[in-house]
Image (spheres, coloured by chain):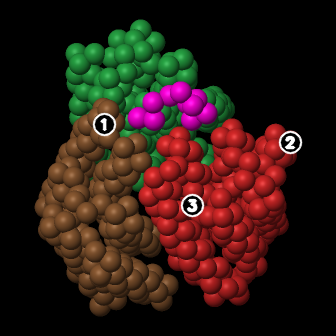
Chain colours: A green, B brown, C red
Amino acid sequence: MLFMPKEVKFFDLFDAQAALVLESASLFKKLVCANDITRDNVSKMHALEHEADEACHNIINTLNESFITPFDREDILDLTNQMDNIIDGIYLITNRFYLFKIKEPSQESKHLAELMEKAAIEVSQAVISLRSKKNLKKTIKHCVEINRLENLADDIRDEAISRILNDEKINPLMAIKQKELFEESEAVTDMCEHVANTISSILVKNN
Amino acid sequence: MLFMPKEVKFFDLFDAQAALVLESASLFKKLVCANDITRDNVSKMHALEHEADEACHNIINTLNESFITPFDREDILDLTNQMDNIIDGIYLITNRFYLFKIKEPSQESKHLAELMEKAAIEVSQAVISLRSKKNLKKTIKHCVEINRLENLADDIRDEAISRILNDEKINPLMAIKQKELFEESEAVTDMCEHVANTISSILVKNN
Amino acid sequence: MLFMPKEVKFFDLFDAQAALVLESASLFKKLVCANDITRDNVSKMHALEHEADEACHNIINTLNESFITPFDREDILDLTNQMDNIIDGIYLITNRFYLFKIKEPSQESKHLAELMEKAAIEVSQAVISLRSKKNLKKTIKHCVEINRLENLADDIRDEAISRILNDEKINPLMAIKQKELFEESEAVTDMCEHVANTISSILVKNN
């Protein structure tokens, strides 16, 4: 699979956006696991989210100016929008932890943050390996792993929500906050799965 | 870009459906801001939602009978289904306000209703401007504005939910109701964004 | 419409997956209506969900090995993923009932379980009737019926949530659990509607 210069550019742009996905997931895990979600760190995450918006717009602008693309135009649009959703989702949860005044995230939130980072690693590797058809099996393996991590996140969220809602001593408002944070963390792994599905779709059409 | 009569018909039908999107968003804002969500007004909204269903079915029937379409068949289907989702969402929230017996929507709900109407205006203008390729830049501008309004709605929802959940004196059941209404209002701006994404995809493929 | 052997294989695989959709919805309804969501029955549902995962992977593998497909490759991918989502959703709710220690599902949950089974019947019949173009009208009828059932489920969920949240004597944690179960049951009918939308899209493109 030999690409034209214009097509190579798309892969470069995707790699840059995937690096931001990974950077925000890693920062999130670090902050959650260190009980360090401060106003300053929310701002740091917001700056990252803003940078990611520009990476996404950059890809869409390039798409609008290109006649030749390495795969279907709508798949390029889906892929960049879905990576953007991951970073938006991570920012949203960071901000929620701060607004909800949660000083110490629960063990399950920390566990979910670890899974989010792992899924982000797989997303970035799947995107990077899209560049060459020789990577087909490797790319599929990353997508399968994202699915496995998403299933794991489902289980952790379900157990965590149940623990909270079966705790008769908990303050109901705190229960609602914790439930929300579990759900939104799991939703980030869903967004990673959407990227995996789009990549699977690209592979299925271009194989 | 010169269209065949059959193709012109699709734009006419889209314009009619977009007008219903705007009408329901405007009615919703009026009712919420006037503290006027009564059983009669819920019925009025329901009639509008029913009319919109027929506009959507009309487009799908025309699609099934047409060999020539102004853009990809699946994009026509997406666009009409997504506009329908907006109106369904607006009806759902109206009904929830009534069922939840909320006599006076909160300031944040009123603010979100205003954003929903603004997003609906942009949706209807983006759809109308799809008719001519000369409008390309204008159409993109409407889509960008929808994204901006959706981001704004995100922020208002997050602040509003946090205010509610940090209020130790609130009745927990009332907290759940208010949270639900904030989330569903924001979800309508997400649905507007889905329309913007489909329109972007149409532009990217037909540019 | 005469299909090649390879294409016939896809329909056989879809029929097998659709049978699992129906089987899990029927088991769910049976368990909910008999107040019989035990650890053993959750395991039974989990085994079904696992079997369905393999049916889905089987279709994706066949797709990756096939040059000829009865309709667009991405539609095959969407259809199998969306059927898988239905079964995942049904397992999730079953598990939640168990984790939430709900011994007697509410009347509304039973009603929603019946609608879920009805929607699953329509899904399986729509998928089976995809095999022949002679079934076009029948297939559309099944899709329309899925939409009707989804709307009905919306109404039941909204009434049920309102009943719970207007009940001043309810334990707030129990209110959150019940609301969650109503929402997730309705979400399964949304997933059935996604299948109906994909089938509509296949019909619109291949008519």
Q: Residues within 10 Å of mark 3 (few under 14, many from 20)?
A: many
Dot 1 corresponds to which residue? B169
- Residue at point 71% right, 87% down? C134
- The amino acid pointed to by label 2 is Asp
Of marks 2 and 1, the one in the foreground: 1
Q: Amino acid at mark 1?
A: Lys
Numbered disc 1: secondary structure: loop
- Left or right of residue C97: residue A26: left
Q: Earlier in the sequence, mark 2 or mark 3?
A: 2
Residue A16 visible in the shown view: no
Q: Position of residue A199 (x, y in %)?
A: 53, 42
As measured in the structure, the alpha-carbon distance from the residue carrying label 2 to the one carrying label 1 is: 42 Å
In the rendering, at what x and y percent does residue C162 appear?
A: 46, 61
Q: Say which element carries label 3.
A: helix
Question: Does residue A71 lie above or below C122 as drawn?
Answer: above
Q: Is residue B60 above or below residue B169?
A: below
Residue receiving disc 2:
C40
**Who is closer to the viewer here, A95 or B125?**
A95
Q: Quadrant of residue B42?
A: bottom left
Determine the residue positioned at 56% across, 78% down: C148
